[in-house]
């Protein structure tokens, strides 16, 4: 099994096939001898080689079927984990914004501000509900034409920041010239920024955040740094799976994820290799 958990193809028939070749070679060597041994030994070698070859072919086929079965089971588990991570992203992000926005209305005095907060909550709720409905449609048997995964690229970053702004985050977004970026890396960049902002909303409240997406040679670097919790803010814990799922996504692409305190706040840094832009 590889480091990613994907089953690897192996067969016990390979050593037997090597032995068959060795036996055949020995039979060829004794072919020039005389006497009873010259007749019997090659026949014994040939019979053993044929029997071993038949067994090796059958074993090869059995091992191949077993490998394909393990590979199918692994693919099913991977798909379930992917769906679980996507559902977590949708639910955690949407409910996190709703929770923080609803909590912030306690300190609002003007009716117009309260109305604006309720409008934001409604929009986020509708968006999260629509995304959940789309994902559930994907899981139905009659949804063969539905997209199998959410589509997101770098153009979605401003909308992600704008959605976080409805929860009170004051976010500065800087995206340098990245050149060509593969679709998988673009999706992971969006997921990284979304998860980082969602964690900031939960743990620090309406604070200042700086998001920088740039390139270090063949590596895309995402940095999200917040200024720390606002006075009196009580953090809202999540399921505790966001960073773990994000680290799995990034590691699957050969990247790394670091999360650590920075001054009074928190810093999240992701480094993802990308061959397309090299």
Image (cartoon, helix red, strand yellow):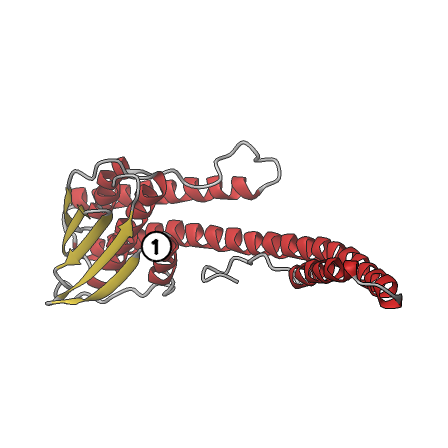
Name the outermost residue toward the right.
Answer: 36
Quadrant in which the C terminus is drawn: top left
Furthest toward the top, the residue is 145
Q: Residue at x 55, y 44 (%)?
A: 139
**Relative horizontal placement of residue 71, taking residue 48 as reference (left or right):** left
- Provide residue 188's location: percent of width, then percent of height: 33, 47
Q: Give the percent coordinates (x, y) of residue 31.
A: 78, 58
Circle 1 — which element?
loop
Q: Residue at x 81, y 58 (%)?
A: 46
Instruction: Decide if residue 193 is on the left or right side of residue 128.
Output: left
Q: Residue furthest front?
A: 34
Which x, y percent locates residue 61? 72, 53
The vertical placement of 71 against 145, above or below, is below
Task: Out of 105 and 66, give the one closest to the viewer.
Answer: 66
Q: Which is nearer the eye, 150 or 135?
A: 150
Give residue 232's quadrant in the image: bottom left
Q: Which residue is mark 1?
A: 254
Give the total number of marks visible in the rendering.
1
Answer with the quarter of the image where residue 70 lies.
bottom right
Q: Determine if residue 115 is in view.
A: no
Percent position of residue 186, x then y: 31, 42
């Amino acid at each position: 099994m590889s480091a990613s958990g994907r089953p690897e193809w192996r067969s016990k028939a390979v050593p037997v096939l090597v032995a068959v070749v060795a036996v055949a070679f020995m039979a060829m060597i004794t072919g020039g001898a005389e006497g009873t041994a010259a007749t019997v030994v090659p026949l014994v070698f040939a019979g053993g080689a044929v029997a071993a070859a038949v067994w090796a072919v059958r074993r090869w086929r059995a091992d191949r079927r077993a490998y394909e079965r393990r590979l199918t089971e692994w693919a099913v588990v991977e798909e379930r984990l992917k769906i679980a991570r996507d559902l977590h992203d949708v639910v955690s992000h949407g409910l996190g914004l709703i929770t923080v926005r609803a909590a912030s209305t306690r300190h609002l005095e003007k009716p117009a501000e309260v109305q604006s907060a309720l409008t934001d909550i409604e929009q986020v709720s509708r968006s999260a509900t629509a995304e959940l409905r789309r994902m559930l449609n994907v899981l139905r048997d009659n949804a063969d034409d539905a997209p199998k995964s959410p589509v997101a690229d770098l153009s979605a970053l401003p909308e992600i920041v704008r959605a976080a702004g409805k929860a009170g985050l004051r976010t500065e977004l800087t995206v340098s010239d990245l050149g060509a970026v593969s679709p998988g890396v673009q999706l992971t960049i969006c997921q990284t920024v979304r998860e980082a902002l969602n964690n900031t909303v939960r743990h620090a409240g309406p604070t200042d955040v700086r998001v920088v997406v740039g390139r270090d040679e063949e590596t895309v670097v995402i940095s999200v740094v917040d200024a720390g919790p606002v006075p009196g803010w009580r953090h809202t814990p999540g399921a505790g799976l966001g960073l773990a799922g994000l680290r799995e996504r990034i590691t699957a692409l050969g990247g790394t994820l670091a999360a650590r305190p920075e001054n009074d706040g928190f810093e999240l840094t992701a480094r993802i290799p990308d061959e397309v832009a090299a």
